[in-house]
């Protein structure tokens, strides 16, 4: 594939939501071209919402996403798909489709209306399947795969699209540790070889620090810290973003920040909690909330 370093992706004053509920209120971000950026943040803070908006899957109610300097809303779908690929957090495959067919769909944007297959298509598909270790299961239907196998097939499809910009929402979910590192190492290879711009959502902060050039920490639909891993992953930021007390020490292999949660128990026989947090089951306010939910019949079927 050709190398392009001039591509760019940014957002200005985005507001995005679902129905009446606004999740992102006024977010601006410039994704560094040719680098790996990692978005981190607690569940439901808006990471996937941001990624989908950057990929034009969600339309912002205010603000603009700029792809190569142009409003992404004004660029036709196929033209967007030639520049930018997205692996969503929970993709769904057509029923009965095989691995090879699904990966092949990554080539559709390149094939025009009559879908003429070229040698380039075959090579890109084989290459993507080889790097994600799914060649051996090429003929199997997606529905019959394990969670990790399926995840690798989706990554293969995104790779086969051969876009300059690749957005991947939690690509390591379901993968065993070996495959997690294989996928992340592969993304670094692609980034180094082709200067591709890669944006990942990851929950593992240590992996985020190891593999990200640029980290973006989100909380409540806003960016609260941005920069290189040592600027972003500090004990204060982790406490603020995740409400978790941690120690941050240098990763013994890479030297990047490594997060060690303090938690309430350090071993099965230790003294409880040094950070003052109570388990939900011991917390009077949480117990009162659960009692009131039970009294209101929270789990009762509504059709009775
Ligand atoms: N399709 C939808 N319709 C309505 N609300 C949604 C929809 N998708 C997400 N939300 C809400 O938007 C908020 C942000 O969700 P989002 O998926 O962006 O979070 P996230 O940071 O990716 O979380 P996670 O780490 O769990 O993947 C949540 O409160 C969620 O319930
Ligand atoms: Mg998400």
Image (cartoon, rainbow, N blue to C red):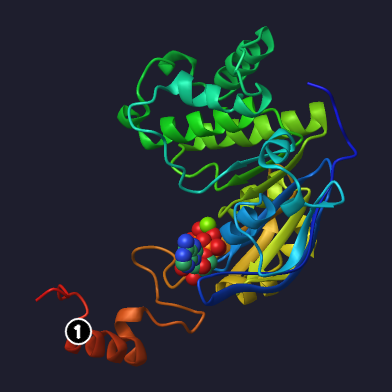
Up-down: is 168 above or below 289?
above
Residue 102 seen anywhere in this rendered image of the structure: yes
Neighbour tally class for label 1: few under 14, some 14-19, many 20 plus, Cα within 10 Å? few
Where is residue 79 shown, x and y percent of the image? Answer: 73, 37
Where is residue 230 shown, x and y percent of the image? Answer: 78, 59
Q: Which residue is mark 1?
A: 294
* Ligand 1 closer than 8 Å to label 1 CB: no
* Residue at the image point whose x is 44% and y is 77% from the top: 273
Residue 44 seen anywhere in this rendered image of the structure: no
Report the quarter where the C terminus lies: bottom left
Up-down: is 156 above or below 272?
above
Report the side of 89 relative to 304 (left or right). Answer: right
Question: Foreground residue, 6 or 254?
Answer: 6
State the image quarter where residue 114 is shown. top right
Report the side of 134 relative to 109 (left or right). Answer: left
* Residue at the image point whose x is 57% and y is 68% from the top: 45
Q: Secondary structure at mark 1?
A: helix
Report the quarter where the N terminus lies: top right
* Residue at the image point whose x is 63% and y is 47% from the top: 207
Q: Tell how many labels.
A: 1
Question: Foreground residue, 129 or 289?
Answer: 129
Where is residue 74 shown, x and y percent of the image? Answer: 76, 51
The single residue placed furthest to the left in the displayed view is 304
State the image quarter where residue 62 is shown. bottom right
The single residue placed furthest to the front in the displayed view is 113
Where is residue 93 shown, x and y percent of the image? Answer: 41, 35
């Amino acid at each position: 594939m050709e190398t392009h370093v001039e591509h760019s992706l940014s957002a200005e004053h985005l507001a995005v939501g679902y129905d009446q509920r606004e999740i992102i209120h006024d977010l601006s971000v410039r994704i560094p071209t040719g680098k790996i950026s990692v978005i981190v943040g607690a569940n439901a803070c808006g990471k996937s919402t941001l990624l989908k908006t950057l990929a034009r899957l969600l339309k912002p109610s205010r603000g603009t996403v700029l792809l190569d300097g142009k409003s992404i809303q004004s660029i036709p779908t196929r033209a967007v798909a030639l520049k930018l690929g997205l692996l969503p957090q929970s993709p769904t495959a057509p029923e009965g489709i095989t691995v090879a067919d699904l990966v092949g769909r990554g080539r559709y944007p390149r094939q025009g209306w009559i879908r003429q297959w070229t040698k380039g298509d075959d090579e890109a598909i084989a290459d993507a399947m080889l790097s994600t270790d799914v060649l051996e299961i090429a003929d199997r239907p997606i529905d019959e795969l394990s969670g990790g196998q399926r995840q690798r097939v989706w990554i293969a499809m995104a790779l086969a699209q051969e876009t300059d910009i690749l957005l991947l929402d939690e690509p390591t979910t379901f993968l065993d540790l070996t495959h997690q590192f294989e996928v992340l190492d592969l993304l670094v290879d692609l980034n180094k070889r082709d200067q591709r711009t890669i944006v990942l959502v990851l929950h593992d902060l240590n992996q985020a620090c190891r593999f990200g050039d640029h980290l973006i920490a989100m909380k409540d639909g806003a960016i609260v810290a941005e920069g290189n891993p040592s600027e972003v992953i500090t004990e204060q930021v982790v406490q603020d973003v995740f409400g978790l007390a941690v120690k941050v020490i240098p990763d013994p292999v890479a030297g990047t920040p490594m997060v060690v949660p303090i938690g309430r128990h350090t071993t099965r026989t230790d003294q409880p909690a040094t950070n003052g947090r109570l388990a939900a089951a011991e917390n009077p306010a949480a117990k009162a909330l659960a009692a009131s939910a039970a009294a209101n019949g929270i789990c009762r079927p509504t059709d009775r």
